[in-house]
Image: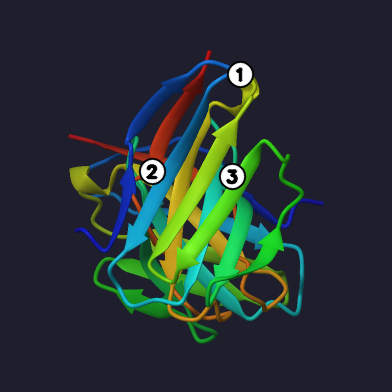
Amino acid sequence: RKEVEQDPGPFNVPEGATVAFNCTYSNSASQSFFWYRQDCRKEPKLLMSVYSSGNEDGRFTAQLNRASQYISLLIRDSKLSDSATYLCVVNIHNDYKLSFGAGTTVTVRA
Amino acid sequence: ETGVTQTPRHLVMGMTNKKSLKCEQHLGHNAMYWYKQSAKKPLELMFVYNFKEQTENNSVPSRFSPECPNSSHLFLHLHTLQPEDSALYLCASSQNGGSTDTQYFGPGTRLTVL
């Protein structure tokens, strides 16, 4: 089983729509979770950390479901600028190493 | 943003060449990382340095040789590479290599091996 698995998409949505996707992880004891965003041919950048109780940052909401070992990202009121690949990142063994998913591609169309 | 810089941004090399990738971070961090990103694949961790000491070599072939002379600089020396080594090589840094640290990435070096 892969340490971090994501639906690759692509998710093609119109502006203003809501889009959500999940990511599963392999170790139930993992404690640190992140969503990174990577634009085409650019480096990954931290979008938000994911906290146990769930957290929001503007139009972005992240949730953690420990029982089912997945995290989710929801984007409300999608903008064209939200088009990117979203990387699910988990510190699987609670050490210095991050495990990356292959990414979920989101394309927002006008 | 210039927190983590990488040079060169693009590199084309033959299989018999020797080249080096350079990474510099201006964030005062103590941990630095090399990752490889191939098309449609997750980032693969290659090496980790924490306070200049190598703490991870993720079964990377010896044709890749890292060097960390100080906490701000990280090099990846390349020799006799194979075409399958063509990828985006990303450098990252974090405060202390802790489990909750955010990693900040450089823009990457896009490497093509002919």
Q: What amino acid is labelled 2 in the image? A: Gly
Q: Position of residue B96 (x, y in %)?
A: 50, 81
Which chain is disc 2 placed on?
B
Determine which of the numbered discs, if any, sits on residue B108 in the image.
2
Residue under disc 1 on the same chain as residue under disc 3:
yes
**Pointer 1 and pointer 2 on the same chain:** yes
Q: Amino acid at mark 3?
A: Pro
Residue at the far bottom: name it: A53
Q: Which residue is mark 3?
A: B42
Query: Considering depth in this image, is A71 or A42 the residue closer to the camera?
Result: A42
Whether marks 3 and 2 lie on the same chain = yes
Position of residue A95 measured from the top left corner of the image (x, y, whole percent): 66, 77
CB within 8 Å, label 3 to label 2: no
Pointer 1 with pointer 2, Cβ within 8 A: no
| Residue occupied by mark 1 | B83
Please identify the residue farthest to the right as the structure is shown: A1
> In the rendered view, does A97 fall on the left or right side of A59?
right
